[in-house]
């Protein structure tokens, strides 16, 4: 779960009716919105979520082979998901293997637990 400066909560959950996972936004006014359902990103088993300093969502997903790290940028009322790191991206000679919890540091760097490689990956500045 992540919270932005306006008090909105972003939650990873499974849609019981559809059987897929999504990012949900609970606004400060108590309105629910499914975010990932309106994007091209298919979340298989999202694990971690954080917000960067620009209000963009960062989501780790352990369900796609070795895992994917997404960035979701808000454009109007929708979020556009792009892949930051895929299961084929090499980082210091390793590929992701079950990306887990994550955090965004004061410099804007993303700190990602790469669980099966037993390391912390630093992405960005």
Image: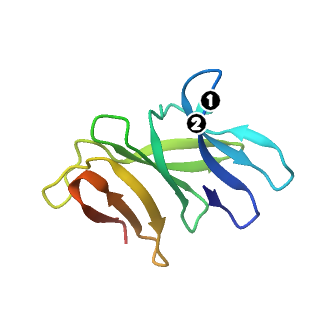
> Can you give x and y, in whole percent of width and height, for residue 104 in the image?
48, 68
Marks 1/2: CA distance? Answer: 7 Å
Q: Quadrant of residue 76?
A: top right
Disc assigned to residue 15: 1
> Can you give x and y, in whole percent of width and height, for residue 27 in the image?
78, 51
The quarter of the picture where the N terminus appears is bottom right
- Residue designated by label 2: 22
Residue 25 in the figure: left or right of residue 27: left
Q: Are marks 1 and 2 in contact (CB under 8 Å)?
A: yes
Residue at x 59% of width, y 39% of height: 13
Residue that protrudes farthest toward the top in the picture:
18
> Is 22 or 125 nearer to us in this picture?
22
**Front of the two marks 1 and 2:** 1
Report the number of numbered marks: 2
Residue 5 in the figure: left or right of residue 55: right
Q: Earlier in the sequence, mark 1 or mark 2?
A: 1
**Relative to residue 91, is residue 26 depicted above or below?**
above
Q: Quadrant of residue 119?
A: bottom left
């Amino acid at each position: 779960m992540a919270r932005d400066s306006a008090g909105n909560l972003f939650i990873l959950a499974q849609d019981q009716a559809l059987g897929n996972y999504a990012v949900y936004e609970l606004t400060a006014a108590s309105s629910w919105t499914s975010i990932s359902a309106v994007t091209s990103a298919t979340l298989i088993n999202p694990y971690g979520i954080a917000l960067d300093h620009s209000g963009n969502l960062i989501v780790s997903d352990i369900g796609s082979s070795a895992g994917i790290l997404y960035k979701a940028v808000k454009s109007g009322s929708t979020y556009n998901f792009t892949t930051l790191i895929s299961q084929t991206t090499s980082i210091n000679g390793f590929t992701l293997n079950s990306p887990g919890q994550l955090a965004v540091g004061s410099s804007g760097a993303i700190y990602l637990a790469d669980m099966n490689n037993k390391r912390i990956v630093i992405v960005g500045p």
